[in-house]
Image (cartoon, grey):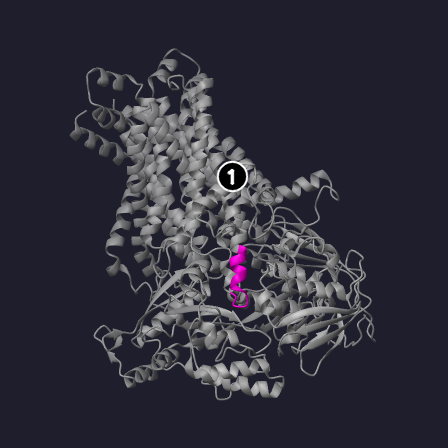
Amino acid sequence: MEEVSLGKAVWRRFRRSKPAMAGLAVLLLLCAMALLAPHLATHPYDDMHTEDRFHRPAAEYPLGTDHLGRDIWSRIVWGSRISLSVGFLSAALAVSAGTLVGAVAGYYGGWVDVVVSRAVETVIAIPLFFLLITIVAVVHRSVFDIVLIIGLSTWPRVVRIVRGEFLKLKARDFAEASRALGATDARIIWRQILPNAIAPVIVAATLLIGQAILTESALSFLGFGVPPPFPSWGSMVSSGKDYLRDSPWIALAPGAFIFITVISFNFVGDGLRDALDPKLKR
Amino acid sequence: MRRYVLGRLLQVIPMVLGVTLISFVIIKLAPGGFMTVMADNPDVDPALVDRVRVMYGLDRPVMIQYLVWLGRLLTGNFGESFVEARPVMAIYLQWLPNTLLLNVLGMCCIFLLAIPIGIIAAVKQYSRFDFVVTAITFASEALPSFVLAMVLIYAVALPSHGAIPLGGIATYGVRLGNAGLTAVLLDRARHLVLPLTVVVFGGLTGLTRYVRSSMLEVIREDFVRTARAKGLPERVVIYRHALRNAIIPIITVVGQMIPAMMGGSVVVEQVFGWPGIGLMTLRAVLQRDYPVIMASLTVGAVLTIVTYLVVDVLYVVVDPRIKYS
Amino acid sequence: MRRTRFSWLIVASLVVMLLVSACTGANPTTGGTSAGPAGEKAAPQVQGNLVYASSDNPVSFNPILLTDSASYWVAERVFSSLVNINVKLEPVGDLAIDWTASPDGLQWTFRLRKDVKFHDGQPFTAEDVAFTYNTIKDKTYTGPYGAAFKWLDRVEVVDPYTAKFILKESYAPFITTMTFGILPKHLYDAKPVAEMKDNPANRKPVGTGPWKFGEWVPGQYIALTRNDSYYAEGPYIPDVRLKFVADSNVSVAQLEAGEIGAMLVPSKDVKRITSTYADKLSFYKYEGTSFEYICFNLTRPGLMDKAVRHAIAYAVDRQKMVTDILEGEAVVMDTTMAPGSWAYTTQGVTHYTADPKKSMAILEQAGYVLGTDGIYSKDGKRLSFTLITNAGHTAHESVALLIQKELKDVGIEIKTDFIENSVMLDKYVYPGNFDLFLSNFGSGIDPDQYSFFHSSQAQKNAQGRFVGYNRASYSNPEVDRLLEDGRKEPDKAKRAAIYARYQQIIADDIPWLVLYSPKNTYAVKKQVKGVISGPIGPLLPRVWYSEQP
């Protein structure tokens, strides 16, 4: 199991999956869009052309305008920064915290596991949505708060998954063997078990990125999302839903971006899962 | 085994205490109270506001309020709603059946659909069926549920001219007293179609994907190959050997779905006017009706904790390699 | 969630007043003047049903405890009151036949109808009237209306059909407060007043109104049934229901599908609904009494300068706001007085027409210098403020963003902040911790606006909150005097003059910048006829009738 060939092997297998490659391409494009926002946007995101409200998609407004006459394309472009940050950061937060705690709990077992598991279940037991709504009402909403809240409220799921994998894997021969050979705990956790447990974590992580973007949009729907005038895709869909009948593009354009983004993350995660699966490697 | 379960049951106590304490403190941190709107009116005597505050014990330190609340809870009393001035339990029980109906039915549909679909998709990996299933699960996973709900209302309910209602749980006047059982059941079913679709569509994909990926993993394991090599029929290999092992991570996912559904149905309940716990709690949060919020959080938390307990016990039951300690 | 939370007491009394309306001569369609369905024209048939929509869930139907609009809907149909306000906003008798006041205005005697029974068969008497109002005056009363009756001393029962109100001081708007639904004493007097909120009768109300309380399925609907022994005309529609729909897009869809028969159409849907459904729905337009405004904090540097407030008033294009954000479903307003009120005036009241150049000229004249950042400043202080409003209120959010843009164009920086309503009130509005806030208000029938701008109303109580609505901290001795006099002056013409002067001063000082008053479009299904629409909404639902069973 040399590092170099592992990376190459993963990439070779990943490349074989068309959806995963397509997803990766889309995500790279979206990241480029977020980085190049000032150059891609045709209007400032909060500029109101009130005489052109509810404008259909046209040359001047590629994706139309919303109820205040703001250019939807420009808002989507700027909004990609916010929505992608919400997705990436909250998933990163959840996965890093969750993996660490889950690995420790699953590997050591005994009272460590009992205490960690019960603590995590205590947090997970508080219904996510009410926690979110209450906290969002308390804190002064900002993008960062929303990231923190979504991340903090989803990390216990990762703990559960990682812990379950560790429970299963630590009894396996390879872990027992390493232990017999005198490997340190850290090494066994990090080098032996974690690579074998990574597939479900990656599946979970990709789902979490998508879910974070969706959770933000559901929060927006209930009136607790990223506050205006910052354009998050979720808040754009949610304010556009009132005009779904006559001016569907207001909700559907950002909705399509959410859809494509989440699907791409899931494709990539799926491809990675197949590519990383150690059992295929033999 | 009995000792393990008993031990786990004992651990439930500090967990419930933890959940309720955290929730209580968070809720109390929120500015604004149910007196806020009342106090907004200059015609309301400030002395009255103080009197009501004292009446509900809101003038005392948060920890004392928590202990009082906890003490009452031990006698099975969730207290009285500030807003509705009647026992929280009565309010809760009034809204609970609707949530249960929607979610239990939803869970059943999800199980019945997701497990076979996931297995078939895994067994026939890269087939056309697998492709379609994967495409649908990916697509539905990426769709915000309120968008789906609104689209269903405009695309299905509105053009159906009343065949599929726009919301609510029953047609006025259609009840067992004055309509036949079939008519009543049919009416309830019509009202269930759209909310159930949204609930199932939202929950289906996660489980299907997990079943599929879990099956894929297991199918490649040695013991499955061995079983195949021994010449066992494919059916036996899949359903006896593979499924049994694939089900383990699925249990975790199901365990996560139950509380998630209770919380996630707020959006569905809001759009379809389905009077369930989600709507009740959302209103209570907006009105800062602490006793109602606390009841909802506590019941939800206990439900979740018990689900995890059951999941862990099942883990031990289905996978003999895991020792309970 | 477009509830006028700031003013629920006023809106509340208004709604109760208007909708449980009067008996005599209030039905122009039949032209009858008697209490019964008499006259030349045959009485409409008793048939049909009408489903109303509500986004609120009601809580308690007790008229002296309730605080939300869904509960009013029920109370205004199940209870009746001593007096109602008619289409012309004048008081007319309902349970009271007539009333007389002593010359000093301290004693009011009401003669009551003798033919009225509660829905449970018990007779209605002066005891019930005295009980209802004396409960509000009780020291242990927990409802919100106590302080509104500060001037009332007690109510006495002269004989079973005569009630006497004894006032501590003369109070000009007295008669407009006689609009609370009368409670049945026999269901409430067994328990102390402090426990009234727990009385089961609050959830299954018994009144003397045209409809009886029927069935309530929480989260679904409330059904009322006809009171067959109602003492006055109607009701003709026996089956009325209030249906709960949380999402306004869904309730509009239900209106289109015919599942809802009467509701206020959200302004964004008015154009489409009125043009598409003219054959299925009748529309009643009216200008409500509520208005949207920006409150300036006059203790803040910059905003305490009248020139800055004038500059802001000239920079904000209210007409554009109305046409572009509200789809024309609103009217620009210049004063806090409802245009339907007899005290309303435009004479001498400054109307601010959008004029960015004038704004900038005013600022420059007042010594402000345009900085390189495009923002005016004076003595090193930039004109930069934060405008807060309640999150989730689409119109407020949009208006705030528009104002932000317009003020930027004239060199005033505005940061917007959208905060959940009760958080906003508790942390920012009550303690006076804001620069500007955007909100709405319902002005009452009576022109008394003492609590808005009297300097005493800008003081804070022990908890550090304003005692009145004067959160602008506005103080002007002349306005104080006018408001004090207006409350005591019994002569209507003299009062009108007082309030005209008051409106002129306020429009010039602009502690509040009044923006607009939303127009309302009320849709009722075509089969329902006889709908009376007053200046502030459809009223007297008991005389509406259905042409179809």
Q: Is residue C161 left or right of residue A126?
A: right
In magenta stretch: residue B43: yes
Vertical order, B197 against C65 (above or below): above
In magenta stretch: residue A7: no
Question: Amino acid under label 1?
Answer: Gly
- Dividing the picture into quarters, in which one does residue C455 lie? bottom left
Q: Is residue C330 left or right of residue A137?
A: right
Give the residue displayed 72% in from the left and 53% down from the top: C190
Specify few, some or many for label 1: CA neighbours under 10 Å numbering under 14, 14-19, or 20 or more. few
> Considering depth in this image, is B290 or C367 the residue closer to the camera?
B290
Disc 1 target residue: B71
Which quadrant: the C terminus of chain B? Answer: top left
Let me know if residue B129 appears in the view: no
Give the residue displayed 35% in from the left and 50% down from the top: A146
Q: Position of residue A207 (x, y in %)?
A: 36, 39
Q: Is residue A23 left or right of residue C525?
A: left
> Considering depth in this image, is C473 or C283 the residue closer to the camera?
C473
Q: Position of residue A109 (x, y in %)?
A: 33, 24
Which span is picked out in magenta?
B41-52
> Considering depth in this image, is C543 or C306 the residue closer to the camera?
C306
Q: Position of residue A240 (x, y in %)?
A: 44, 58
